[in-house]
Every structure is written in C-alpha cells, then in structure tokens.
Image (cartoon, grey):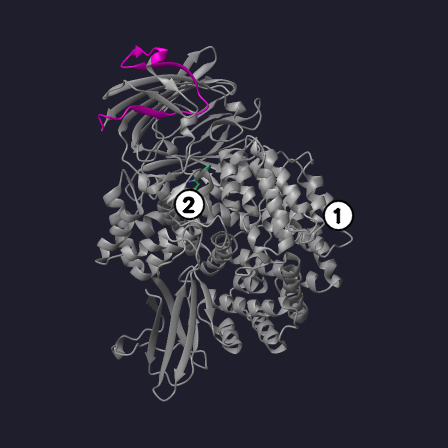
Amino acid sequence: KPTRFLRDYRAPAWRIDDVELVFDLDAAATIVQARLSLRQDDAAAPLELDAEALELLELRIDGRVLGADEFSLAADRLVVPGARGPLVLESRVRIAPERNTALQGLYLSGTREQGFLLTQCEAEGFRRITPFLDRSDVLARYRVTLRADRARYPVLLANGNADGAGELGDGRHWARFVDPHPKPSYLFALVAGRLESIERTFVTAEGRRVRLVIHAEADAIGRCGWAMQCLEQAMRWDEERFGRCYDLDAFHVVATHDFTMGAMENKGLNIFNAKYLLADPASATDDDHRHVLAVVGHEYFHNWSGNRVTCRDWFQLCLKEGLTVYREQEFESDLASRTLRRIEDVRLLWRAQFSEDAGPLAHPVRPDRYSEINNFYTATVYEKGAEIVRMLGVVLGRDGFRRGLDLYFARHDGHAATIEDFLAALGDANGVDLSPWLAWYEQAGTPELRASGRHDARRRCYELTLEQHTAPTPGQPHKRALPIPVAIALFDAAGRALPLRLDGEDADTAAHERVLLLDRDAATFRFADIDEEPTPSLLRGFSAPVRLVQDTPPPALAALARHDSDGFNRWFAGDALVRRLFAQALAGSEPDAALFAAWTACVGSALDDPGVDPALAAEMLTIADATSLADGLADIDPEAVHQARARIETGLAVALASKLVRRHAALGDLDDLAVDPATQARRRLRNACLAALCRADAAHAPLARAQYARARNLTDRLAALGALLGMRDTEADAALADFAERHAGDALVLDKWFSLQATEADPRACERVAALLVHPAFRWSNPNNVYALPGAFALRNPRAFHRVDGDGYRLVADAILRLDALTPQVAARLATAFGAWRRYEPLRRALMRRELERMLGRERLSPDLADILGRSLA
Ligand code: HT7
Ligand code: ZN
C-alpha cells in the first residue's frame, strides 16, 4: 500500500448525505444494494469510491444503468469519471461472508450451520461491503433494511432505532433501522443470526427510556449479567462525571468469539469479543471481571468521544482512543481501586509502550504517515494517548478539564475533529494556550526525566533540578522539550508532608502536594522554609509518561515505599528499589545486602499492615516483568535477565516466607463467589502469597494442590495451577489434564490454559506450544486462540521465545506466515514481537533478523505484515 501523509489531508471532494442500504443476507452470498445521495464540493474532482473484494452486479446514476465504459473498478477503487453532483448513485454487489477470514467487513462468526453474521468496519472495512467514500470525515444518515431467512437468522440488528419489521414469504423476514445521528462508515454495523438476549430498561438523566439488550449465543447468554451491570454503571457514571447522556431508544451489545480486537463501538450496536463481555466466577477470573467493566465502559464512552465527535482522519485516531482510554481508566478508578488501576496502567505502559517507543516501530501518538492503518492501533496511540489526556487533566484540574471537555463536545458535536480542535477547546474553556502540548502528539520516544535534589541548611531551602532529554527515534533525530507536569510532595523524617512554597510565593497558599511544570530542557525549583533534608516523592500518580532517573538514596526510597500517602508512589518507590537490585544482579554481583533488606522490609510491612489496601500489598509483592526490567538496556541477554530477576524474586519470597504463610492463612475465608472490589483485592493478595511461597520452597506445594482441589472460582483454580506449573510440581501435569477436562468446550477458559503453558518461563515451553498448536481446541482462524498460544509465547515469554538455539523465533515466524494467509491483522500483531531485535545481544540479533528476512522474502505477503516487517528492518 502507498504511504499516506498527514500533510496531504484534503477535505472530501464529494460528500454523502443519506444512505439507504438493503441487505439480502446469506453466509455464502449476500447481496447489498446501496442508494447514496451524493453532493460534489469540488467541481473538478472525479467520483472515486473505495471498493474492495466486491463483485459489482449493477451501477446506476439517477436511475440510469451505467455501461461498462462509464466506470472502472480496480482492486480498491470504483471510478465514475463523468459523474457530476448532486446525484443519486445506486449499486448492487455480491459478497461472500463465509470466505471472509480477514474478519473485516461482513463475516461469519462460528460455523455456517451454527454461527451468525456480523460486521467489523473500523478502520476500512465498510468498503468491503459496498462502494463508498470510506473515510471518517464523510458523515451520513443511514436507513438500513435487513432481509434473511427467519429460521436461520431470527435476530436482525443494525445501528439506530428500529423502524419496522415483517414477513417476506418463503420463510424470509425483514427489519429496518434508522439512525438519526450522522455517522462515518466505520461505525456501521449489522448482526444477523440465532442469538439469545437479556434486557433491562435504563432511564437517562434527560428522561429517555432506553432498552439495553445484550445478545449472545445460547451457551453464553447466562454469563452476560455482569456485563449488563457494568453497562448500567457506565451509563450513570458518564452522566454524573462528564454530563454525557445516551441518545437512542436502544443500546445493543453482541458477543462473538471471532474478533481481532477487544470490542467495537458501532453506533448503538457495540460488538464485543466474548472475552470482554462474558463473565461469571466459575468461568472468568477477577481480572476478567474488571476487564469486562473497563471494556464495556470504554465502548460505551465512545458514544460521545468517538461517535458524536469523531476523527477527521485516521492520523487523529488518538483523539478518540486516548480520550476514551482515559475516561475508561477514570471510570474503573472511581468504581474499584484507583491505586491498582494506576499501577496496572503504568506496568502496561512500561512493558508495551516504552518498548515500542525504543525500537523501529516507534511513532508519534499522532503519526504523520502510515501505509496500513490497522497497524496503528498500538500501545502508543492508546496508552500514551491516554497519558497525554491525563497530563492535561492534571494541569487543568478536575473542574477545568470538565469545562474544556464540555466545550469540545459542544463545538464539535456531529462533526469530525482534530487534535488541534481538542487542545483549542480545552485551552479556550480555561483561558490558556495549550498549543505547546501538541509536541507530545507529534514527537515519538520516551523522555528521560532526571531529578536531583539538594538541601541548603543555611538558606533553609530545598532545590530540585529537573532535566529532560528524549533520544532520537526513526525519522526524528532532534527532539523538542515537552511540557512535563511533575506532581510532587516532600516528606520530613517523621513522614509528614511539608508545605510546598516556592521562593517568592505567598506563605498562605502553600499546599502539601503540587504540580511543577517543566517546559524547557532544565529548570531548578527552590522550595522555601525547609529545615531538614526532605524525602521527595516525585511524579506522584505517575503524572507524566517519562522514564524517571532520580538520585534519591535507597533509605529515602524505602521510607516512601512504607509511608507515602500516594498508594501509587509507594509501589513506585518499591519498584525503584527492585530496579537497583536487578541492575546489581544482572552485572553479576551479589545484590547489596542493606538494599535488599530495606526492600524486603518494605514489602513485609505492607504484608503485615492490615491498614494497607491488600491490592497494593499484592502489587508490591509482584516485581516488574522481564521486558520492563530490560527497558533501556542494550545487548540484552534474555536468559541473564531471567536469572537476575528470578534471583531477586525468589530472594524476596524466602526472606518473607513466615509472613507470607501468616497472611495467606489469615486471608483464608473469603466468599469464593463474590467479585466486589474488596474481596477481589484480598483474593489477589492471597494468590500473590501462594505464588511467592511456592517459589520459595517446594514444601509449600500442598497449599497449591489443596487450593486447586478446593477452588470454586476460576481465579483460585488458575492461580493454583500456575503455582504448580511454575514449581514443576509432580502433580502439575495431572492438574493441567484435569483443568482441560473440566473446562472442555469452554473456549475462553481453554485459552487461559493455553496461555499458562505458553508463558511458563522455561525454554521447553517452545516444544509445549508446538504440541498444543495441533490440540483440537486450537483453531488458526480464531484470533483469541492465536493470541492465547503463539501470541502469548512470542509476546509474554521472553525466556523461551529468545531461546538461544533460535527455535522460539522459528516457531513464531512459521505461525505468522501461516496466519498471514488467513487474518493478516493478527499476523502483523504477532510480528511486532521481532520489532526490538536490534536491542538484543549479537547472536539473538542475527537469529531474529534472519527470521524477519525470511518472512519478508515470502511471496504474496499482506500489506499488514509487509508493513511491520519492512519498518522493523528499516
Ligand atoms: N475502536 C475499536 C477499534 C477496532 C478495530 C480496528 C481495526 C480492526 C478491527 C477492530 N476492532 C475494533 C476498538 C476500541 O474501542 O478502541
Ligand atoms: Zn476505543
């Protein structure tokens, strides 16, 4: 595919005001009739429509059938050179949903006999349904009629409000939908098939009665209750926190097992990967329950941040995704544990985004070029995009941010907007110029923030010097200084937060926590009235997505890890200690005994203190993963990273064994089936204790065996199985077999079983994965299976993937090539596992490069995969 550039953006030459679609649905051959009312804004521009994988049966303009010489149809484009607007274009095309394994456009979920039809149109799938101006700045009103065999497709759904239904004879029926809200084509959706549903009524703050309907196949409908509760909570929360109400008579949600991503926010008809919709304690873990809450919220929140106000073009993808991830994070933080959500988000940012930013696939949050847009649904666009919104929230404050968002929605409702529009609305509502923040969207790479403090006893002040530096990334050799908000508190020796008054400020206004803005390469902030050397707590709540390098001595970090009033920063300080220990272990030296003792004492005190949130204690016990610990390293030897990490992790467990036994026992009597945040937090801690104990000493195996045998929920059963597998217990294989038998036929649970084996930090996981690829429950055409097995192996098992004999690389490269012929988007996602190849030691580097070149040398690669491989090797 040719590269597209942001700088080449032109407003559409033609626009579509109204769309009428009629579908005659059938898995083998569906006929789509479209009637488009087109307007011409640029008299010189020919009519060019996007069209892919369509068999064109007929084309008319203003009722007249066009002859073959009046238009041309190439691989991706339908051109009508002589057309002059305004006009009505009618097309009739045939498509084959059951042969659509790319899962974009109209496709079949499940089998021809049992499955159902559905669509996925973001980003460019609508052009695989009908010829169209398939770009997000063409907003049209849709009227859609679905016709199908009633017995085979009893449920018919499309966006908008229902507008009639009836019989057609021959056992066929029809249903019509009208969507009053103009929308871009990527938000179009239809669903047809045999589905069951659950339903509730929701009355919005504006008084609208809305039918909430969740649809799933018969064997899954019993697991939709949790998602319904989450949906109601999300709708209420968006009204209360952001003043956003729902705007149609019905909101439909559908679960499918065949989906390349998490879910899709189609207007009034969200479609979900079953993994993020179905949940009950027997078949979903606590984490799954929280993910359902977050994803249901995320898709619902898109109704405003994405649908009512959409993106002008795909370069602006972060406009809807960054903002919606931020809204989702706030939703979960308000409803469950804010500290836990923040720790998890930062862990994800470090693991997925910082590493993306450090390699050849690095790109700005708003890319300025792309060849395949599907490859830009990345951690950078989503997670770093959300971090930018969070920073704006920090500098504007809660009320200022709300004012700004209100103005953004009011100004751009029903339109397609840009990042500049977003910053202008937030700035205008608060009387500030936010244009310097554009640099965060335009510049790739993770800034390094250096902080050094100096206490001046004579002048009773504390000087904090902050410096920023961003290393070059592909295509961006020189970096600008960014505005970096640094939330800070200073603690005295007794752990009390000190009033923070900068030199020259009024004494009365001193707050105990404040935000410093570093908006140049370096700056020094001088705090007055500081009598003794304070302990600085920096970047509180992780106020900016930077790599913090601080000169805070270990005893001060240990003090923060014990007493910081910000739960996130307690964990953050503990993590800083872990990283220093890890650096020593990796260098081959014995970890500093005092440092080790200080760290284990912090974790131990979190374990002992009943006043500490158990979720925080669990996180303090769970050290950073290998990918995140290797952040910033060159010539990585994954085996050495594994050994160094294991040494620290096991050392902690051994040092705290008696405390772990005590806390594990004390947490013994939890309600097995409760999923409220408090119970989840205690269960999390209990399972973190179990994992640590099993790591410390094989003598604890009976605890894991007993938990496996007794478990009544999936969280406990899976945690016990993981512990047995990790310690290579003699009963691990029997437990694995038991688990597979117990959950046979449950695809989502078996995916966890696949993942557990694929991510076991043992080089032999490679052979295990190879064997599981022919397991009857594994299907190459199912993205969840692929992400759970070869995907988990490639992206979450660095020790085995990077096996020094290169077998891990070969296994994954073979899988990618096989997948590319089926579902290119999934193949491309897996191929990102090779992206960081230049950061590894010479042998691995050569082996990875060889596999990249082998894949790139294959004929007929998809544009998706060719793009990732080409950029990786550039
Ligand atoms: N907005 C959704 C994106 C999405 C997608 C993109 C490309 C191909 C398939 C896809 N399925 C869903 C997801 C979201 O809510 O962020
Ligand atoms: Zn989204």
**Residue identified by numbered label 1:** 733
User: Quadrant location of ligand 1?
Assistant: top left
Query: In percent of the image, x 65 and y 50: which residue is there?
Result: 717
Query: In percent of the image, x 68 and y 43: which residue is there?
Result: 769
- Seen from the viewer's position, the closer of residues 534 and 817 is 817
Q: What x and y, as percent, mark residue 239? A: 32, 47
- Seen from the viewer's position, the closer of residues 810 and 440 is 810
The vertical placement of 282 against 654, above or below, is above
In the image, residue 66 lies in the stretch drawn in magenta: yes
The vertical placement of 604 against 812, above or below, is below
**Residue identified by numbered label 2:** 298
- Callout 2: helix, strand or loop? helix
Earlier sequence position, callout 2 versus callout 1: 2
- The amino acid sitting under disc 2 is His
Q: CA distance from mark 2 to mark 1?
A: 38 Å
Q: Which portion, as a residue range, is magenta? A: 42-69
